[in-house]
Each structure stands twice: as C-alpha cells, then as structure tokens.
Amino acid sequence: MQSGSTLADPNRFKFDAEDFYLKSAAEMRHTWREPPEACDNTLLIAERCEVSFTEGEGRFMPRFPVPEGESEQSWFVQEVEAGLRRRYPAGVPDDVRRQAEYEIEVIVGKGYPGYFLVVADFINWAKANGIRVGPGRGSGAGSMAAYAMGITDLDPLQHGLIFERFLNPERMSMPDFDVDFDERRRGEVIRYVTQKYGDDRVAQIVTYGTIKAKQAVKDAGRVLGYPFAMGDRITKAMPPAVMGKDVPLAGIFDEKHKRYSEAGEFRALHAEDADVRRVVETARGLEGLKRQWGVHAAGVIMSSDPLVDLIPIMRREQDGQIITQFDYPSRETLGLVKMDFLGLRNLTILDDALQNVEASRGITIDLDEPEQDARRRPHLRACWPAATRSASSSSTAARCARCCDSCAPTTSRTSRPWARSTARARWVRTRTRTTPCARTSSRTSPTCTPSLAEALEPILGTTYGLIVYQEQVMAIAQQAAGYTLGKADLLRRAMGKKKREVLDAEYVGFEQGMLDRGFSAASIKALWDVLVPFSDYAFNKAHSAAYGLVSYWTAYLKANYPAEYMAAVLTSVRDDKDKSALYLNECRRMGIKVLPPDVNDSDAEFTPVGTDIRFGLTAVRNVGANVVEAMRASREEKGRFGSFQDFLEKVPAVVCNKRTIESLIKAGAFDSLGHSRRQARRGARARRRLRHRAEAQGGHRPVRPVRCDGWRRRRRGRPVGRACARSASGTSTRSRSSSARCSACTSATTRCSASSTCWQGRPTARSPRSSPTTPVRTARTSRSAA
C-alpha cells in the first residue's frame, strides 16, 4: 500500500529472506555460537534498561512565573479580585462575589491556579498586541473567575451559564480552555508561549489517521490488482455512514451488531462472488491500521518539565516544529496539559470590517457596546454562524430581541442540527397552551403531568419548552431528582457515552430521586426517554452563548456598515470561488455594487468605496500578494498608470508574468486605461516578443515601442480619425500606404509608404505581409486603428 504497487509486481518492495521473524533464545544462541558471550551481553544491557510512565491528571501543569514572595494560589486570588473590580467598576454585586469565592475554592482545591494564570497570560498578551480574541469557546465561558481574569468576555450569571459544566469537585478530568484567535495571527501567540515557557516545554500534538472499512476495501482491491470498479462496487453495497461512523467489516458479519440488518446486500454480494470474498478478507486485515500521521489542528502541549524527559518527540523537517509522538489520549493520561489555539475566520472578518469602517468613515467602534445602536435587523446571510438557510429562517421566525435570544439558539442549530437525531420532535410541554415554537412550526407538543411541567417551567421557559442545552439536562437532574450540579454533569456525560450498564446504574438513582419528590413512575420514564436521546445532539450553552455574541457582532456590522462588512467577508473567501459567488450575490441583494478590479484603484483586499466595494486584486486568479504589493509600491513611487505601456514600464519584472498579466487583462483591471482587452493582450505579447528578441541579440535593451497618433489622441481625449498615422510631413494620408503596427495599442496603422519613420522620426515596426512599395487596402486597417 505504501509503495503504490501491486502484489503481482515482481519488482515491488518485499522481504525475500526467510529470517524475518522473532527467534527463540535457543535459535539466537545457535546463530551466535562462535562468540557465546554476545547473547549474554545483550541480556545484561536489557536488564539495565528501565522505562516507566506514571499516570495522573495534570502532573506536568505549566508553571506561571509569579512575583517574588507570591505563590500561584495567592497570585491567582489577587488576579481574580482585581479583575472583578475592573469588570464591575460600580461595585461587585453580592451574587457575583459569592460565585467567585466558590469558584476560587474549587480551583485552588483541584490545584489549577497555575493553569488559569497561564491561559490568562497569553490571552491578555494577544489583546495587548492587537490580536483579536474570541469572547469564549466551550464550557469555560461559564466561569466567573475566567471572566474576571479576561479569559472570557461573557458574564456567566447574566447569561445563565453553569460553572459545574466546566469544573466541579466530582470531575476527575482536567478543565480545558479552547481559545479562538484571528486566524492570520494565531502563529504569533504560539511563538509567544514557546519563547516565554521554553521551546523544550512546548510542542504540537501528533494525530494518526486510521484506515476505515471502505478505504480498506478500496486499498485491498488496488493492491490485489483489481480494477477500480471492483472496490467501488463493494463499497457501494456497504451500509452508509451514520454521523461519520462506518460499520466495521467485522460488524457486517456479526449478528449482534446493531446495524447488522442493513448489510444484507453486502453479505449477498460477498457470498456469490469469490473475488469479492478475496478483497474483503484482505481488507479485514487492513482495517484499523494507522495509515499516516499528521498534526493536531489546534492542540499545543505545555509542560513544566522538558518534554524530552517525559514522552517521545520528533522534529518536522519542513519547518523544524517539535511534535509529540504520543497522541492526545495518551498525552492526557500521562498528565500533560493541552491548550487549544484555534484560528477563527470570523474574527478576521470582524477585524477587517472594523479597520474598513475606521479607514472609510473615521469611526472607531467598540464591539463590547453595540446593543444600544442595533436599530436595524439584518438578513443573516454572511452573519456567522447563522449563515445557513435553516438557521436564517429559524432566527427570523423567532423574532427575538436580545443577543443570546436570537444568536445562541441559532448557533446550536447551525453547529449541531436537531435534524440529525431521531429525537428531533421530542420536547417537554411546559404550558397548557401550545408553545410559541410549536405554534411557529405547526407541531403539537406531547403532554406530561402538570407537576412535572410546573417543575420544568423555570428551566425550559426561556427556550419555549424545548430542551436545547446540556446545562438544561443538568438543571433538570438537579431540580427533579435532587442531584448536585457536579453529579448532574457526570449523568450528562454518561448519557453521551451511551454505555448500557452505566445508564442502568444512573437510572436507579435518578428514579429514586424523582420518586422522593412525588413524581409518578410514568413521568419519570417519559422524562428519562427524552433526556437520553437528546444527549446525541445536545449543545453546550456556554459555547453557544459565546458564539452567539460573535454572530451578534457580525449582524450588527452588516446592518449598520454593510459595504465595510461585506468587503471583509469577500476578502475572507477570495480563494473559494463557490463562497465568493454566494456573497457577491448577497451584495447584489443588498444593493451594493462591486466595482471591477483596477490597477490604479484596487488594493490586495476588497475595499469599500463609499457605498460600493472595489474588487481585490488577490482574488483574481494567478495574482499573488507579492505581485499586488509590487504594483502598489510602483503606483505610490512613480504615480498612477496612464496606459498599459506605462504600466509595463513602471512595474518590476515580478509583475510582468504572462499568466499574471493575462489574468489581469481578462478581469478588466486595465479597462480604465482606455484599451480594449484584446488590444491589451496584443500589447503584452508584443512586449514579450521584444524582450525575447533583445535577449537573443545579447541582452540589449529593447527598442522603445512606437506609439501611434490614434493612441496619443485617445490619451489626450481628442477624436480619432479613420487613419491614425501621419506622414513624415505631418499631414494625414490614406493613399500609397503600408501596414505598420503601433506597439502601444498594437493595432495596425496606416502610414505613408514613402517614409519608414513615424511623425516623430522613430522607426516603425512594419507588417511582414506588406512591403513599402506594395499598395494596401486602408479601410480595414483604419477601422482597427480607430
């Protein structure tokens, strides 16, 4: 498989000898019988080697450099206190103070103050250096301590977030902060932590790609020499993947597998075709093997000790990056801490949009206070993460007024659609009348007992009776069954894993808790049957609220600064032609005119021009950022380009690439210079011919091209006649002429046959099809010149 050959290839890579197996001690001593001490010495060396790994969560937590006389615990408490005063300048409310003190007790008791200090350090460094950071990601947004230290920018109490979803005394695993950065500057933050905490203590994480069932079948068919159609026919008979998971080949033949009944067609094909059986049997030996290694998209290991003393590492040849050889699960077991540095395109869009607003309108916007100015409701196309048809329609139907009312449910629908679960229409009715969501979607909610509906009203009232968030599962377990929030989080995790024995054990305590509170057995069973399937598609409310805020920011900018925002959106998708077409159509719907690219006016990115947008040059195919930068530098240093010839003379050689120039011509970047695109292409070819001729003659500089009178008149705004050339005496002529070509506009011109020079005395480039003494029809030539 690795060499790309087949088993029938006699020259394939293979082991021909018969000694490639693990030999017994007796065989080894017989092989090395002449020096008998050889085997004894290898045994002595082996007995001296000792390698062991000690498991434990967070054993190698990175250490934060605290001031002298302080410990990580004391400095953490001081940082939280200072952050609370900064977040609440009018005074810290009592409920905020109680929540912060509770979290400090849990965090210090679990031994995680250093972890919070390190995360706050690189996030605040990024903000101080102008790198846009997301308001939060994942369950960490539910922490008041994180909000006070600047790790998140979302008040957890105001948005009803639960700290225990992130960290609680019953939880044994490490907390995990995922942080979003501007995707263009994510590498700067990784370099910062590498330099501050030591390049021997920071590394990226390896990932291993596994051969799945369908890929194993295709690979086996190719290696065995069968045509591609064989593997394709077998894989099409296999059951389709569900939520990204294929049925393993062993499960297809296992009657106990839950999807065994779906593979009848495959088993029939396997039974009747010997070639299929051969391919499948080979594939079963390949399935599950590691195919290749890669690098985790966002994970970075940060350790208190040198990594070379803890785990095996390697260096990537392309850029010298240090990468672990243990993957993420193994690393976590050994006590190493992972930080997620993610690049989010929409933070890049927000940053570009704010810069566009400041450049075009001179207004500096603070996104932390947009609600007071959000007077207009935009269409949600291009407002991430609500930029899908279903999310846009659902948010419009809801007609919500607040940020988290409209954006957070939209986020959960966009990121993890309810339609992916068979329990899509299952919810608990909390009112005797039809709920607003049920009324909007024309469905009828299943009923439950009044006592259960009354108990769940405070929890599900804000989502119109629907269970949307994981935190609601925890709150229901606390309210209805008497769970602590820490224990409720463990229940939520058990529901997500779907292990039957774990769920049966959890149901006993859940049932007893609800019975103690007076609920009937029917209500208990009904609620349990709703909660367990829900965990397949449940969403984290803290994550949803944080991304809802990002969605609200994008909607605010689109509604109030449409040209500036859409210019930033188009810049972000300039390399994706499908998305570019989608957002260009959105600009048309909004009434925003997208002006064509222009060598005199366009920049690398899409830029707002009043209420219009100027097309960015880097979005033109075959035009790179270095080319645009060279063009802009020439434009600033030597002035605007007056003609196509003037452009070629001013820009450096890196711009005068055939593919680049032709792409700019076809995109219309030279249309404002007064040339047609056909003329510009001819001029570019003439320029290349002159350069090649000069190089063939010894590298002499090409003769300065001739400019016809029609070109000069066009440049000066004068009318152009049918004959654009002049004779040596300066009078226009249409008789006794020969065909010549002007190198500026590359059109055939009519010149006096008695002269081989233009009206300025320069030599003309005569057409090879005519001679100075041969009369030429002038009508067609004059038309092309005009």
Image (cartoon, grey):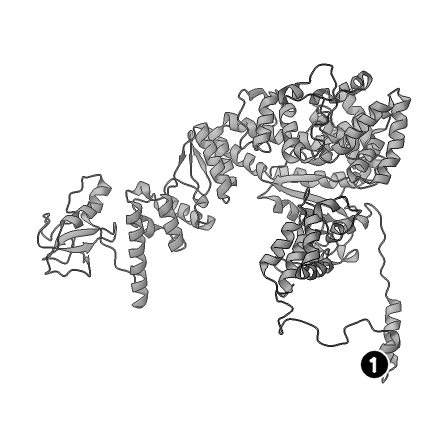
Residue 172: image location, x then y, percent: 84, 40
Dot 1, crowdedness within 10 Å: few (<14), some or many (≥20)? few
Count of labels in the image: 1
Residue 187: image location, x then y, percent: 62, 47
Left or right placement of residue 375 versus residue 545 in this view? left
Q: Nearer the viewer, residue 760 or 683?
A: 683
Q: Which residue is mark 1?
A: 31
The quarter of the image holding the C terminus is top left
Q: Residue at x 50, y 41 (%)?
A: 578
Query: Quick check: 191 above or below 438?
Result: below
Determine the residue located farthest toward the front in the rendered image: 272
Specify the quadrant of the image occupied by residue 695. Answer: bottom left
Query: Quick check: 655 above or below 418?
Result: below
Query: Quick check: 438 above or below 123?
Result: above
Determine the residue located farthest toward the top in the rendered image: 433
The quarter of the image holding the N terminus is bottom right
Report whether residue 364 is seen: no
Specify the quadrant of the image occupied by residue 326. Answer: bottom right
> Disc 1 on helix, strand or loop?
helix
Report whether residue 556 is seen: yes
Q: Kindly identify the amino acid type of the residue bearing the numbered disc 1.
A: Thr
Q: Nearer the viewer, residue 677 or 389?
A: 389
Residue 346: image location, x then y, percent: 58, 36
Left or right placement of residue 455 versus residue 764 in this view? right
Residue 270: image location, x then y, percent: 69, 56
